[in-house]
Amino acid sequence: MQIDHVGIATADAADLGALYTDLFDATVVHEETFNDMQVVFLDFGNATLELLEPLSDNGTIASYLDRNGSGIHHLAVETESVQDALDQARDLDIRCIDEEPRPGAWGHDVAFLHPKDTGGVLIEFVEH
């Protein structure tokens, strides 16, 4: 497994994306509307950031912003099999938010682990 990307919750993905492209010379490599959010992926060469902007007042990212404000939302780890990664997490008694892989942004299969069991960090498994 390896780090795939870091998700950042923000009230304005386009604005933050423009700042990061200017400040860090990053490149926008993908944008989409996914579920209740606008998603912008930025390539930093050796890392990718996923900017998450809520499109409604009652979605998961909107709730996160209400509780925590803008900032790091999750750490995504690439795996060859999300299902195998979930099984391994269960074997370690880690609570899974998703019981099985589900569709994620950019057409990837994803699943999340509960942050109470992972050091306070929301972990996302990503299968390309």
Image (spheres, grey):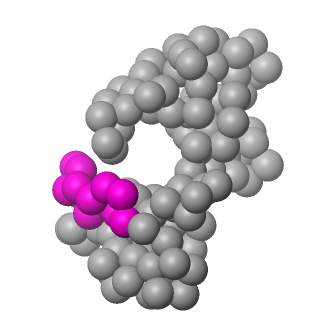
Q: Is residue 6 visible?
A: no
User: Please, is residue 52 above or below residue 47 in the view?
Assistant: below
Q: Which residues are magenta?
A: 28-40
Q: Is residue 41 above or below residue 55?
A: above
User: Residue 25 at what x, y percent from top left?
Assistant: 51, 78
Q: In this picture, is 44 found above or below 87?
A: below
Residue at horizontal 59%, vertical 25%? 79
Image position of 97 (left or right of 54): right
Give the x, y percent position of residue 72: 59, 67
Q: Is residue 101 above or below residue 59?
A: above
Identified at 64% across, 29% down, the residue is 95
Q: Nearer the viewer, residue 72 or 2?
A: 2
- Residue in the image at 35% along x and 38% along y: 104
Identify the residue at image location x=33%, y=44%: 105
Q: Quadrant of residue 28?
A: bottom left
**Quadrant of the image for the N terminus?**
top right
The secondary structure making up most of the magenta span is: strand
Instruction: Give the left or right position of residue 69, taking residue 58 as reference.
Output: right
Question: Is residue 32 at least partly visible in the picture?
Answer: yes
